[in-house]
Image (tube, grey):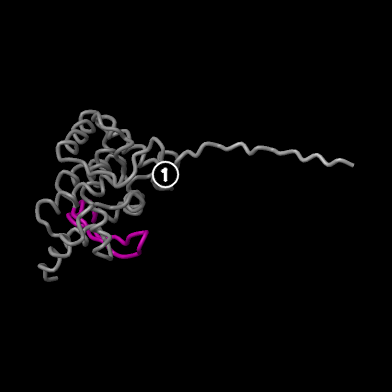
Amino acid sequence: METHTQIIEAVRTPFVPWNKGKVTGQKPPLKPREVWAIRVRLQISNRVRDLALFNLAIDSKLRGCDLVHLRVEDVMQDDQVRTRALISQRKTGAPVQFEITEQARAALAAWVRGKELKASDWLFPSRVDKRKAMTTRQYGRLVDEWIAAIGLSPKAYGTHSLRRTKAALIYRKTGNIRAVQLLLGHTKLDSTVRYLGVEVEDALAIAEGIDV
């Protein structure tokens, strides 16, 4: 009996990189003029919640997961917005403190009072279910919208752009990597170096000149 061998040629699927068409690497921080451009558009369109969220994102330098899980009592005492706040980071459990500038305090006060939020309420509740906080996905969509509104590409920027904005500006003005490390809530200096894209030797030279 004759045996016939059938050779099946494998059909190769062309390899497509996961990041094809995407901007990879660190998301750049916003420039001061870009911050103001977004801020003005939110003010003109009377988007009270978005203005409060945007201003607090810039000031706090928090990760998106921490920002959307703030409660009113984290940023307010009685009926006044705090000038400084202290929270525990969800990712590391470590405490981090941040400042709340005058314009951010005004925006937050307008938002909280306008919505009649209580101390135990989520600062930015979900519009679908007020018992839940805004999701990080929703926050990301809002950031994309803000970025696109001033003519920038949402693909090039993201929520970390807002987290990095003030930190990058502080580093450029002062060269104080240790201060930036504390403000970002990083446990290791190396993390701050990578996050800001600072050269390691340069960062260490700066840190060695700082007494903590």
Image position of 197 (left or right of 207): right
Residue placed under numbered mark 1 in the picture: 130
Residue 3 lies, in percent from the top left, at 83, 42
Q: Quadrant of residue 74?
A: bottom left
SS at mark 1? loop
Residue 31 lies, in percent from the top left, at 17, 40
Report the quarter where the C terminus lies. Answer: bottom left
Residue 57 lies, in percent from the top left, at 26, 47
Q: Quadrant of residue 180?
A: bottom left
Residue 90 inside the magenta-drawn segment:
yes
Image position of 84 (left or right of 91): left
Q: Which residue is depicted at the point 25% across and 29% down?
A: 151
Q: Which residue is depicted at the point 15% across and 65% down?
A: 207
Residue 139 inside the magenta-drawn segment:
no
Q: Is residue 109 visible?
A: no
The amino acid type of the residue labelled 1 equals Lys
Task: Establish if 165 lies above or below 199.
Answer: above
In this view of the protein, which residue sits in the foreground, 97 or 11?
Answer: 11
Q: Quadrant of residue 87?
A: bottom left
In this view of the protein, which residue sits in the foreground, 187 or 39?
Answer: 187
Q: Which residues are magenta?
A: 76-99
Report the quarter where the N terminus lies. Answer: top right
